[in-house]
Amino acid sequence: MSLIAQLPVLPIIIPLVAAPLTLLLPKPRLPWVWASVVAWVTFAACAWLLATVASTGMISYHLGDWAPPLGIEYRVDLANALVLFLVSGVAALVFAFSYHSVRAEVDAAQTPLFYGAMLICLTGLLGVTITGDAFNVFVFLEISSLSTYALVAMGARRDRRALTAAFNYLVMGTIGATFFVIGIGLLYQATGTLNMADLHERLIGQDNRMVQAGFAFIVVGIGLKLAMFPLHLWLPNAYTYAPSAVSAFLAATATKVAVYVLIRFFFSVFNFDFAFIGAAFTYVLLPLGIAGMFIASLAAVFQDDVKRLLAYSSVGQIGYMLLGLSFATVEGLTASLVHVFNHALMKGALFMAVACVVLRAGSHSINAFAGLGKRMPVTTWAIILSGLSLIGVPLTVGFVSKWYLLDAAFSSGHGYSGFLIVASSLIALLYVGRLAEVMLLREPPSEGKYAFPAKEAPLAMLIPMWVLVIANIYFGIRTDLTGGIAQRAAEALMLTAGGAP
Amino acid sequence: MIAPELAIPLALGVPIAGFVAIWLLDKQPNLREAATLVTGGALLALVISVFAAVSGGARPEFTLVEVIDGLPIAFSVEPLGALFALIASGLWLVNSVYSIGYMRGGNEKHQTRFYMSFAVAISAAMGVAFAANLFTLFVFYEVLTLSTFPLVTHKGDANARHGGRVYLGVLMATSIGLLLPAIVWTFVITGTTDFALGGIMADHREAVGPIAGLLLGLYAFGVGKAALMPVHPWLPNAMVAPTPVSAFLHAVAVVKAGVFSILKIAVYIFGVDFLRDTGAATPFMWIAAGSILLASAIAMHKDNLKARLAYSTVSQLSYVTLGAMLATQMGVMGGAMQIAAHALGKITLFMCAGAIYVAHHKTQVSELRGLGRVMPFTFGAFFIGAVSIIGLPPMAGSWPKFFLMLGAADRGELIIIAALMVSSILNIVYLLSIPVQAFLKAKPGAAHDFEGAWYDGPRFDAGVEGPVKPRKPGVAEAPLACLLPIGVTAAGSLILFFFMGALYDFLTPLMGAG
Amino acid sequence: MENWIEFVLERYNYWIVITLMMTGLYIVYARGNLVKKVVGLNLFQTSVFIFYITMGKIAGGTAPIYIGGELDHAGESHGNGQAGEKSLEREGHGEENLHDAPEGAPASSGDLHGGTDAPQGGDALHAKVENLPANDLKDALKGVDPGQGAEAGEGLHALPHAEAAKISNEALKSAGKTFPEKGFEVEGALHQAGDAANAMDGAHSALGEVIYSNPLPHVLILTAIVVGVATTAVGLALAVRIREAYGTIEEDELESMDNVAEFGDAAEARAI
């Protein structure tokens, strides 16, 4: 058995096996080095996987060599190869980035645990993405969630509210996961299978109450995990009080993976003959997406804590993804996938920049950002560039997302939502503008709680952050990887789901 | 002479190289300013070579990168773009000389940042001018907005912050909120955003027909830089910026990029015939006419010199919009000429206002009485600029008004002609009164009362006290670096009057298919 | 009326599931004490466990453990099935294997298909059984493979898989009368299907086979229990840490303490 034949399982096995080893390594530096190396190797495997899938088509891997309908299948097509690439890429950068930030924000005794939990979380996220087995999704979802609860709670050293945030997240997340597993159970009852491809085939023509209930449970369950608008309440606190490196990692990956799961269930498990799906698009995803875009973005404008501001903005941005999804066209799905990728780049960079500020200023209140342009110019410009990307200024990934979304809105006959999209990005202009103004046009406080010497973050943090910022611009100019692959993935997904509803 | 195909990327690249050079020369002001000037000179030479090629009938093209399928960042120069590029690069050089004088004379802070932003902005303006499709135009339009933001907020105080907020808010809100959807909508309907003579909408009449008015509205207001009322507030608010910035905004690049975009969209996206046939442009023609008159009326009540000039700009820009919305060949021609003529006239006026501020720290119109005898050169130039804006021969500004009236006559819109005439009269009232009062009225509080002494002013020179050490009795002008550019542009206004025929020939291809 | 009561009583396990689920959710929502919340969460998850177990239960079925006496008999077909397994995995529903397998199966299976009076209903039901939670251990092990070949006629197998499933669905609708409307109760529907199903059960005993409960839900729920235990552990650990940091685990007290901290910050921010 060559390594290449086992490629699809590597992204899961490597971090999973590596995670406990972090606990054995001597403390100050080695766990970080080890975790970073592992993350980069995982990234390499994922990149390889993406390249393979892009050239040869879907890969089906049978775990333990058990045949699919019964055994667990890893099924890698373009859609999840792209998400794998994204998640592992962001992870590789965040891991490399995290050393100083973690040292400042997490108890020294906990650092090996921290990196172990991060690796397990990575395993879970990659597992959710790669697996072709519905129940396996639940298992990996819980693997990632459980480690996330612990990670969020580790922010307690700086702010004890991290604990309550983690607890609330645990309650909401568990309810979400349980809903999901009920849904899976109902589907199993209706079809007798758990393999997604098999489920898909057996669900064709089935439209009874059992399947409907299963569908509803699954949508609500994943909705909780991805912070769909009214179900987002756990997210702002969790992102705000988690250690900054964790915020950066989660913001860029966790909700994205959940969005991917939603896409997978909508398009690869269910099909458009199933009447509920049309209703879910029209009466759930579309209005909730739009409501999220506006209400959460507006909430972001009034936040005095930058991490919370960004968290609310994330909820708003998830609205775009749901909106693109709800058009149920190739263009809409492409836009959704592209935005999943692009938003991860922006939010990753932004949260990393906030981590730099927290390292120096010890706070993520907006007051700490006053006059930042004079004290930490490199970080400031990272925030401004990725902030522009968030607004959707040309030559950034945000613009590419907006373009795809608008294209989808107009070509699917939802022209009005095109205007809603741009109107809500103007709200992004408000909160990014507010932040930029504070950073550039205010004088840094010379005394008091928020005064700190003008000193940049260490290079080890600046470099990964700027890699993401440059990725923000690069993928804003070259969209072969994002747009191209997303389009092919969307076409394949739409084909499976059976064309327009 | 380098190939025009190569000159296009160079015209965009040279200012960026200048940007880097200015950054590196942060600590050596003389070398830094030299870098600015060299950049300006090189840019002008490049643009002239492109301009010459275009006037010879060439349409040089250059594709930078394909961002999304069917949406490349590509450049293709046609006469209108070449004209705009020439005006922008020429005036940028002049304005750079002027800003050196102004910034040094005023001891401004953050000069390096100032020149760096300027360099990026002119590069973006070149991108707008050369854009081969709406997508490229939009990209550089936004870069232009962002790169001028630090210029507008240059002073960094509460006023500047507020002005900057309005500036960025209005321009971004309109461009993202209206222009971007309009572009995407166009792309979805026609499958392209390329500029094509005769318009790309013409082939999709059935699809566009019902929404032509809506789309045109999105474009007209989405291009916030064209300052068609009611999306003009950014322009007066941006007056908090130093004068060279105002000159840059009003004459060199920003508003010109706006009206240029409007013309370009009218001619190359909708097509003049299409606009006329569908009648989609008519409501906007009236909005433009209203904007002309309303802005003039507001200008009359502004005592702040720069605010008055700002509203004058709002009014004058609507001439271009009006030209586009008339949807006749003469209207388009008039609009294109107005871009050139107004640029020369308005930059003169702004540089004069700046010179007055540098030399005497006066900002209000009411304070200028009698100042003409202290700054005869400045106010002489101001007079020339004002005459050109008003549209009196023998100044360049008279031609566009003439063609606009021809265009209106073509459509039989007599009310538009009347509006144009009323506007000219209003212009006389609020613009020409400034130099006239400066020359003829006494300084407030001066010993002698000059009231009624018709044109005898110069004889009483000795009676006026100059606040600055006079070179000759009573005369206190701004530094030479400020005066020289003023002279150049004022002379330009005069000269262009006689070469409008050449410009007409140059722009004729614009109407070729129309 | 009697029918109605029967309908309710027959599904008593589902009522338990729903009651537990709602109780759990209510506790999570209504109780301020964090430990009680965790307990509620636990209750909520337990209801799901029961739901899954219900799913796997088959009337008259026994635990999915081999019973010695049957080993000889089934051994043959099993040996065959397992021999074919490796190659099967590669070829999916390879025809060869499917045709090979029946040779090892007793001849009576052929009789069943050839001879029953309702071949339509019988066949369809068999296909359905394969769709539903697999009915015996052999099926479970081999999935849709030889076992199916043995039971379901070859005619069905010639059809593509998806189509077969569809046909079986339709057939079931006609045979099983109320199946789709009955909603959650597939097994109930199955049993109500009456003669055909009984005939099938009879066939099973005739084969000397033992009816097993479906093992898969049990396996799944074992995993879910592990997840549930882990969640409870993390939740309780967090509660302990919260107690250390705040001195309380009552939610309203925590909230008011957090609010003070929050408003302090906000007030400072407004000052700038």
Image: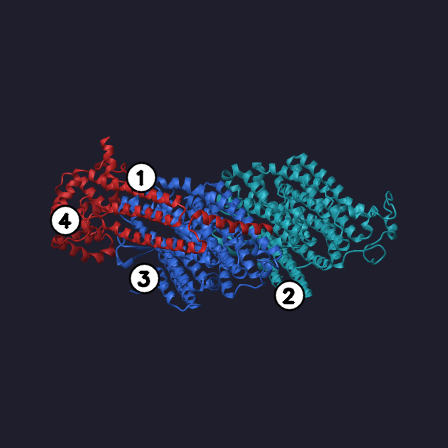
- Foreground of the two, C248 or B428: C248
Residue A487 visible in the displayed image:
no
Q: Secondary structure at mark 2?
A: loop
Q: Is residue B433 left or right of residue C162?
A: right
Q: Secondary structure at mark 3?
A: loop
- Name the spot of residue A171 as percent of width and height, x first: 39, 49
Q: Is residue B102 left or right of residue A188?
A: right
- Residue C209, which numbered label? 4
> Spatial distance from mark 2 to mark 1, Cα to Cα?
73 Å
Q: What hue does chain B carry in this figure?
A: cyan
- Residue C253, which numbered label? none
Q: What hue does chain A carry in this figure?
A: blue
Chain of the residue displaying label 2: B
- Name the spot of residue B328 as percent of width and height, x first: 62, 40
- Residue A209, which numbered label? 1
Looking at the image, which residue is at 60% across and 51% down?
C271
Chain of the residue displaying label 4: C
Provide the residue designation for mark 2: B25
Query: Which numbered mark, 2 or 1, is in the foreground of this view?
Result: 1
> Spatial distance from mark 1 to mark 4, Cα to Cα?
33 Å
Q: Is residue C209 above or below residue A49?
A: above
Residue type at the position of mark 1: Arg
Chain of the residue displaying label 1: A
Residue type at the position of mark 3: Gln
Q: Say which chain is red.
A: C
Q: Is residue C153 left or right of residue A296?
A: left
Where is residue B269, by image quadrant?
top right
Residue B164 visible in the displayed image:
yes
- Name the spot of residue B252 as percent of width and height, x first: 66, 52
Q: Residues within 10 Å of mark 3 (few under 14, many from 20)?
A: few
